[in-house]
Amino acid sequence: MKLVKSPSKWLEKKVQPFDFEKLDALNIADEMIKLMVQEGGIGLSANQVALDAQIFVTKPYFVNNNQPLVFINPEIVSITEEVEDMPEGCLSHPDLFLKVKRPKGVFAKYLDITAKECTIELYDIDARCFLHEYDHLQGIEFTDRVSKLKLDLARKKQTKMRKLHG
């Protein structure tokens, strides 16, 4: 399993529902979690590993004792009216950081690796991470959620960072 970096058609693709009969959820989730940790991320979606299936993993801060969570065929039930404008990064866009406006909280339904239906309520960084990865499954990148001016300025900083760190 390899990380897909921008630009890539995979990152623009809306992926298909996860098929438990064709795919091994446990194996895929384990590989995705290993890659997420290895790359120093807090979330990783199927698009980012060239997999056409609705699955993503996160490393939460406030729930599940900080143990990775696996979300399969997730659905957003509701979001908070309160939003926050906070910096985000993405493993598929190294050294690119953007302030993105997102709801402060999300209530969602999903399947776990055994195909059991689950619900979860997430807030703050955990909600932001969930929504970022959920966007990936819809073919939406965090770069799509900011103005062209914001993106251009962030890309200039990204280029400087790359020159500094070689």
Image (spheres, helix red, strand yellow):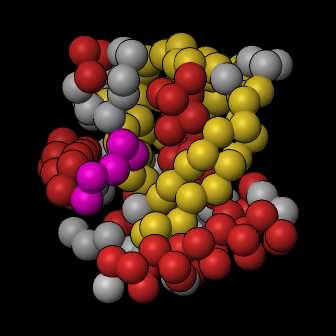
The residue nearer to you, when weighing 139 against 40, is 40
Label tally: 0
Q: Can residue 74 be seen in this view?
A: no
The residue nearer to you, when weighing 101 against 71, is 101
116 relative to 143 in the view: left or right:
left
Q: Position of residue 11 (x, y in %)?
A: 54, 70
Q: What residue do we see at 78% from left, 58% from top? A: 146
Q: Where is residue 128 in the image (x, y as percent from the top left)?
A: 57, 35
Q: What residue do we see at 38% from left, 52% from top? A: 44
Asked whether residue 50 is drawn in magenta, I would say no
Q: In which quarter of the image is residue 144?
A: bottom right
Q: Is residue 8 above or below residue 122?
A: below
10 relative to 56 in the view: left or right:
right
Q: Is the magenta stretch mostly helix, strand or loop?
A: loop
Q: Quadrant of the N terminus?
A: bottom left
Q: Position of residue 37 (x, y in %)?
A: 21, 49
- The magenta segment: 39-43
Q: Quadrant of the C terminus?
A: bottom left
